[in-house]
Amino acid sequence: MSEFRILEIKQSVFADNDKQAEELRKELKKEKTFLLNLMSSPGSGKTTTLTKTIAALKDEMKIGVMEADIDSDVDAHTISETGAKVIQLHTGGMCHLDADMTKQGILGLGTEEIDLAILENVGNLVCPAEFDTGSSKNAMILSVPEGDDKPLKYPLMFTICDVLLVNKIDVMEYFDFDLKACEERAKKLNPNIKVIPISAKTGEGIEEWAQWLREQVKKWKEA
Amino acid sequence: MHELGVVIEVVNVVEKFARENEVEEIDTVVLQIGELSSMIPKYIREVYPAAVDGTLLEGSKLEIEILTANGRCQACGTVFPLVKNEGVCPTCGSSDCEMLCGREFYIKEIRCF
């Protein structure tokens, strides 16, 4: 048996993933495909929000959706009815998507035809925040029934997101949800975060959100 | 409980490193985790045996070093440990501080044959 050794690695666990994410971002930039990483808890209304978002934008740009779930394809079916190109990604028990899985999804979707690719990440506010997917921008949905204290409980998620969609504002009066307090808490963690209150059900706020996406896709294609 | 996916990532990195350095058997893996990382050492220890099963790391020991989270007060500039002071500057009492470190999650080293 050889002698006992200590080998220093000194590497962040996320270093490999960060590198792959950076490469994917560069590729997408070249292909002029904007990738949105959409995250939230289960049941916050991601799929309904997406359906409304696609309806608002589908006449102006080609949209592709990657549905990431641990199992099943119910969300992919719902999205396919909007006419957008959709593929289902199964994480096989993993609670998040990493850059490599996202790349496989992008390859499956094909970038030639896609202006806006949306990754519907696994419903979870913890792990998806740790893994850079290679996205152009990150957005998250927080729904009113979840409570306005979520920025305090899941700080990293709010730190890495460019947009916070506060969904289900149509039922705000039935819950003790303080929109102002929620926004203040999110901005304390991330002064640049844009907060857009929406109701995917009634359509309120969807236009403001769609407008933000329009501008981002345009910027991504220009530079 | 999201540690398993991340620990599997640790296993991938260590296995790759071990192959490149012609390591045949790993005795101990040493991780460094920031106090304010979302990785909980207790859960990392619990999922470790499952994550290393069938890999080069199978049977290896796990050591975790905790790194103190420090912040700098935005009002008076004092650098202080965040957790012990609950985010409040011990010099001037301001809670407006910038986090300097504490979210790390590093693989420090492996001890091996």
Image: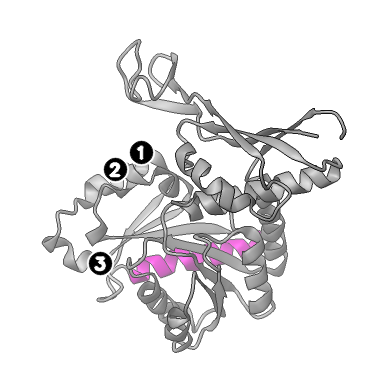
| Subunit that carries the residue with mark 1 | A
Quarter of the image with the C terminus of chain A is: bottom right
- Span shown in magenta: A206-223
Q: Is residue B89 above or below residue B100?
A: above
Residue located 52% across and 41% down the image: B45
Of residue B111 and residue B8, the one placed in the foreground of this image is B111
Which three-letter amino acid code belongs to the residue tagged 2?
Glu
Residue under the point 40% across and 14% down: B76
Between the C-alphas of marks 2 and 1, the distance is 6 Å
Percent coordinates x, y for residue A163 in the rendering: 42, 56
Residue A209 to residue B80: above or below: below
Mark 2 lies on a secondary structure that is: helix
Name the residue beneath numbered marker 1: A188
Between B81 and A72, the residue placed more toward the observer is: A72
Point out which mark residue A184 bears.
Answer: 2
Labels 2 & 1 near each other (Cβ < 8 A) = yes
Which residue is at 12% across, 62% downward?
Answer: A173
Q: Quickly name the residue at label 3.
A: A168
The answer to whether mark 1 and mark 3 are in CB contact below 8 A is no
